[in-house]
Amino acid sequence: MIQETSQLEQVGLERNPGMPLKLDWLKNTQVNLSAVERRAATLGTRRTVKKQWQAAWLLRAITLMDLTTLAGDDTPGRVRRLCAKARQPVRPDLLAALGVSDLNITTAAVCVYPTMVRTAVKALEGSNIPVASVATGFPAGLIPFGQRLEEIRYAVAEGAKEIDIVITREYVLTGNWEALYDEIAAFRSACGEAHLKTILATGELGTLRNVYKASMVAMMAGADFIKTSTGKESVNATLPVSLVMVRAARDYFERTGYRIGFKPAGGIRTAKDALNWLILMKEEVGREYLEPELFRFGASSLLTDIERQLEHFVTGRYSAAFRHPLA
Amino acid sequence: MTVKDIFETMDYGPAPESAELANAWLERHKRKLNLFIDGKWVKPKSGEYFETINPASAKVMAKVALGGEKDVDAAAKAARQAQPEWHKIGGHARARYLYAIARHLQKHSRLFAVLETMDNGKPIRETRDIDVPLVARHFYHHAGWAQLMDTEMPGYEPIGVAGQIIPWNFPLLMLAWKIAPALAMGNTVVLKPASFTPLTAILFAEICQEVGLPPGVVNILTGNSAMGQKIVTHPDIDKLAFTGSTEVGRYLREATAGSGKKLSLELGGKSPFIVFDDADIDSAIEGIVDAIWFNQGEVCCAGSRLLVQEGIAEKTITKLRARMESLRVGDPLDKAVDMGAVVSAEQLQTIDDLVKQGVAEGGQCWQPSWALPEQGYFYPPTLITELSPSATLAQEEIFGPVLVAMTFRTPAEAVELANNTRYGLAASVWTENVNLALDIAPKIKAGVVWVNSTNIFDAASGFGGYRESGFGREGGKEGLYEYVKPVWEKNLPSYKEEIAPQLGAAEAAGFVTPVIDRTAKLYIGGKQARPDSGYSYPVIGKNGQNISEAGLGNRKDIRNAVEAAAKAGAWSRATAHNRAQVLYYLAENLAARAPEFEARLMAMTGVSRRKAADEVATSIERIFYYAAYADKYDGAVHHTPLRNVTLAMPEPLGIMGIACPEEAPLLAFVSLVIPAIAMGNRVIAVPSFRYPLAATDLYQVLDTSDLPAGVVNIVTGEQDDLANTLAEHDEVVSMWYVGSFAGSGMVEQGSLGNLKQTWVNYGKKRDWFDAEQGQGREYLRRATQVKNIWVPYGE
């Protein structure tokens, strides 16, 4: 196995150890949908970044990206191509023009299915870019529990440094928080040193109150990240859902002193979307969250749009997708 | 800053909206702007101009015409001439014009937004995303009302020429709120924008030209308050609509008292923002941002008093301070600021003085750590804690970004604190408990209540105040009535000056067994009461003989009556069905004693038996009419473009004074008092001096009809003196007066103290037997005020 220090470990952020389930932290959960929607809708109208600020923010977005392929037709060839893109997400001439050639801009991670982890790890050798793997019967999670644990161990053994697990939605929908807690705690334990991202599949949880409660239980159970979606639900990452999860993370930090990462995934396709999420993070939890240890985008097509915007900034001309190397 | 630096700091950079096209517009006018009168641009007769300043830079933007008396004359004349034709072209034609205005506003939306921001200092986000879209929406919505006037407003006609004076905090939006309903209902307009912010009104006048609005329909006069006074007192102005300070509103009431001008006032506020312990606190914090740091807090309905339940107070204040740190104040043309500049150096000074006073009174002042821009008139978001409700800052409107926070223990205490103000414009209630929200909203004395939201507006929803926040509504169907009058009012005759009847002595009847003496007393709190004065006065019958004595009520009797009415608050909360039942019973009991009332009317006024019988029968039917309406005068659910229900609820006003006329003494009394109590008000009625007995006879009927004590109180005596005491009484919220022209003016003048609503007849005589004049929804509308409750929903 290749020994590397992943970006996560470089920062020295103390890892959330989890805590016993405290149901009274869920008891008074209040989330007002209309008010949350209003805040989410005005985040991007109250703040914007232009010119070099926009370019810098977009570069930052790239470094926060889990470049992802999670499709039935994934092949080692496609995964290798994705990894190459992760190493060199922006054309060197553009980076030079932006004056950031020495920043070593890469994506935060590459995210694949467990069977592709080995390929990805090999392709990323020497880059410091960690490989994230989905597990636990992604995306529905409805395979026998033992197999889900086994899948985590397999992915970790293959070299994954981060594991994106899915939860049993039933536990949320029926309010069975103990079961949810136990499940996630078991996943965490199976991860060992690998970091655990807990996918809540918010599009299937029904209400924002459920989203908040599930977030809180996941953090108590030891999640390093809470993540919105698999990308396979009919509704994936939205700003209102993100707002609720980030506020839950803020509450958890205020209560425990541990910062939990947040990862919106699914449906984030444009540079404008990415900026809105960065604004959300900066406004709600501050600048310190704009680091790969605490914030990730799960995205596959977002990068191309960002590249086009960066080229526009450099040249003053609108760009075209084919001008940027495929992922 | 290089990309590389910013990549580390992740700062927001400048994001300026270009002022280029707005400046080009100003340059096209050589930065000198004229008056818009009769469809033409004219220089002010004075030849003088004043400067309008960009408060973010403190630099002069343009010179603007200083209108004066002669310009007001010209504008009012043009409006007067245009008005009949503007009405006659019909609702559909007016709808087309208003529709065209809306379209053109949208076409030039960014120019309006930028110009507004430059003139006023508010952030471009607000003018672009809130003000201008609401303005266009207002014209679209009212294009619809123009189209539907014949269908939806039968029996009403335009008032004539409207004089409209608007403030500087929402220059274009207030213009829209004034002009759109006025034009829709067939009125023409003379509008004065605030002298700090005249520019978008001038641009609006250009839109009027663009769409080919007929000359004289809209006239825009820029100028100072001296010119504003000329509009207020101009004889050709039939209606005045004002938005601004309570102080100036009071001046308008005084200046127009007795003039017959219709008046609507939208004034100041000190609106409560109530957070219960089961609220979504993070969302409530954003609500506070929208409540008090919207438009630099220069908002009449700003949620400037934070009332937070004690158990969550510390947490809420901590979160609020953290949130304040991330607010951004700066160049209002920057697309990423939350607050821009305060409108003027004077306003900045006012805010600063008040905050210093608050600190001197023991307030803890907290402001974010970051620095303000050095140029321009900026004030930081400010939180004041540790003040009691008696502190100046807790009572006075600041009109700046200053929030005063207090705590409460129970829902009842929250209501008590919320209502502990002279104002009553708006309120915001935060709780996730629908039972609590819908319990609290009706209890708060305010024209608008936002549940789990704040500062949201729409053309379809009425906006306006209770108490000293003014009267009248803007928006919704309820707002249209400010610009129409009942057709039947048009040709009413004036009262003839009559010689007061001479007192005669009771004719001695010789040595016979006399009838048992019956003395009409006052009726206060459900009891017959002797007048405080200890005097009675003779009531003279048709033949000049003294037929009875009536109590000579005075100020103290009025005081007692108002106190009794205040205790009868349960009537306002009774179900409408319950009120209807009492009224039906009242009619039943009156019918049982019909012959007695007929005889009294004949003896008192000298009417024929048939006429007297008709008056009693009509009175009984009228009581039935309002008993029937008691549970049918419904509110509405407005179609506002949000996922919410906007409930427009007619609420009783509270305690009303009613002075009744001489003619048809029973029927007029019934026609005025019954609709008032049918809607849940409590009444102090003053019958005419000359014919008080029909009313005083009635109290025995009231007693037997299960009407709770204090709901109707009757004080006889010198009518105008008593009416004046009522008009001046601060606990009386509305005064109806049917009597002389002079008495009408007196009542309007007397209403100044608490800016109560008045409905007076200016000496015009109604025919109480005529169903159109003597009864109808107009009476119910005048006996209620509409509260709009916004309830967003969704889980």
Image: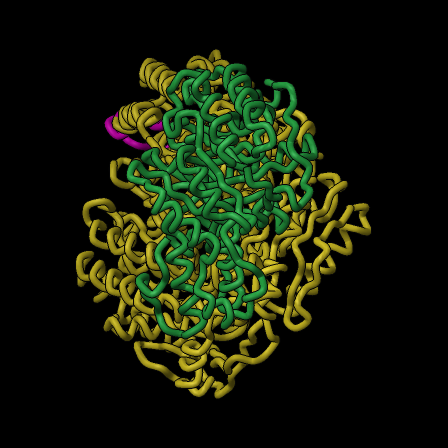
Chain colours: A green, B yellow
Asked whether, in this view, residue B361 is left or right of residue A6, the answer is right
In the rendered image, the vertical position of residue B26 relative to residue B179, given as above or below: below
Identify the residue shown where x is 73% and y is 48%.
B392
* Quarter where residue A324 is shown: bottom left
Main structural element of the magenta stretch: helix, strand or loop? helix
- Counting from the top left corner in percent of width and height, residue B537 is at 55, 32
Q: Quadrant of the N terminus of chain A?
A: top right
Query: What percent of the width, then of the height, locates residue B702?
Result: 44, 19
Q: Is residue B479 visible?
A: yes
Q: Is residue B717 magenta?
A: no
In depth, the one of A322 and B729 nearer the eye is: A322
Q: Is residue B683 visible?
A: no
Q: Residue at x 45, y 85 (%)?
A: B45
B180 vs B291: above or below? below
Residue at 48 percent of width and 42 percent of height: A121
Return the residue nearer the eye: B139 or A104: A104
- Magenta-drawn segment: B601-613
In front of the other: A96 or B181: A96
Left or right of B776, for residue B471:
right
**x 46%, y 35%: residue:** A133
The x, y position of residue B269, in whole percent, is 57, 48
Q: Looking at the image, is B784 positioned above or below residue B522?
A: below
Residue B606 drawn in magenta: yes
Q: Position of residue B554 (x, y in %)?
A: 61, 36
